[in-house]
Image: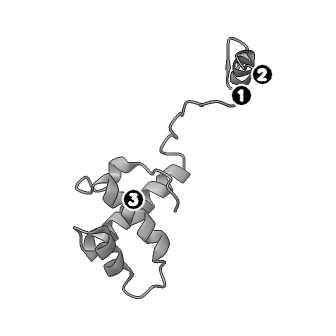
Amino acid sequence: MGSTQFSSSSYNLNWTPEQNKLFENALATYDKDIPDRWQKIAKLVGGTNEQEVKKQYEILLDDIKRIESGKVPLPKYRRNGGSSRINGISNEEERLKHLKL
């Protein structure tokens, strides 16, 4: 489950970003075959209980389904470096022009 961002607008608004990150990491640590999975995840996240963790998981699964089905547009990220071009000049060309050897 990496650090990919899901449509966090659906996430429990009472959870902090830190709790959401702990939740995602806990999901990666405690897979579905771990006994008392939800209890362990709730304890790791802190300030929550098994039922809230299960609900958060259901919301996350729904978000993933919506993203994968194309119902949620992917964000447009700005490119930092690499081969982006401005007025026909790539960032590499611009950096090389100012490079002092």
Direction from residue 52 to residue 33 in the image, left or right = right
Q: Amino acid at mark 1?
A: Ser
Q: Give the number of the disc on residue 56.
A: none
Query: Does any portion of residue 34 appear in the rendered image?
Result: yes
For residue 23, what is the image quadrant? bottom left
Q: Position of residue 66 (x, y in %)?
A: 47, 52
- At mark 3, the secondary structure is helix
In the picture, the disc for residue 21 is 3
Query: Going 64% across and 30% down the picture, which residue do you hit?
Result: 81
Q: Residue furthest top?
A: 87
Q: Is the residue marked by circle 3 packed among few (<14), some (14-19), or many (20+) residues within 10 Å? A: some
Marks 1 and 3, how far apart at CA: 32 Å
Position of residue 20 measured from the top left corner of the image (x, y, whole percent): 35, 58
Helix or strand or loop: what does disc 1 sit on?
Answer: loop
Camera-nearest label, 1 or 2: 2
| Residue 82 on image: x %, y % | 69, 31
In the image, residue 37 above or below residue 62: below
- Above or below for 58 versus 64: below
The structure residue drawn at horizontal position 34% and vertical position 47%, both measured from the top left corner, is 9
- According to the picture, the residue beneath numbered tag 2 turns out to be 101
Q: Which residue position is annotated with label 1?
A: 83
Give the Cα distance between marks 1 and 2. Answer: 22 Å
